[in-house]
Amino acid sequence: MKIPIGHILKFLRKKNNLSQNIIAEYLVVSRQTYVRYELNIVELTVSQIFLIGSFYNLDIKELIFIIEKRDDIRNFHHLDQMLKNYTLTMEKSV
């Protein structure tokens, strides 16, 4: 199953003022391959999803939550708020 998470990758990268090269190096792929991830042309492996979570210091549950809610995302600001709400919800449940 293809999970279109390219817009999420782009959002996280831009939010953190990072270049595609930096993340590509972390994932040990070419910049061109990383661009294809952001464009949803190439799928990420499960291990790469874990690496992305680690890179951005996101719990894998947070990343999966964002991916599952992708249909509700209207713009990047909404995605940022959604992540904050999820974090608050998780903190309350502990």
Image: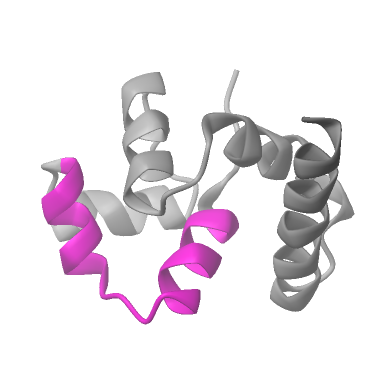
Image-based side of 1 in relation to 16, left or right: right
- For the point 74% across and 61% down, the residue is 84
Count numbered badges in the picture.
Answer: 0
Of all residues, the one furthest to the bottom in this rendering is: 17
Is 94 located above or below residue 83 in the figure? above
Where 58 sits versus 94, above or below?
below
Image location of residue 8, percent across then percent down: 57, 56
Q: Position of residue 86 (x, y in %)?
A: 79, 48
Magenta region, mostly helix, strand or loop?
helix
Query: Which residues lie in the magenta part?
Result: 7-27
Instruction: Using the rendered image of the protein, determine whether residue 44 is visible from the camera's viewpoint.
Output: no
Q: In this view, does 23 lie to the left or right of 6?
A: left
Query: In the rendered image, which quarter contains the N terminus?
Result: top right
Q: Residue at x 17, y 65 (%)?
A: 22
Determine the image quadrant of residue 68: top right
Question: Observer-nearest residue: 38 or 17?
Answer: 17
Tell me if residue 21 can be seen.
yes
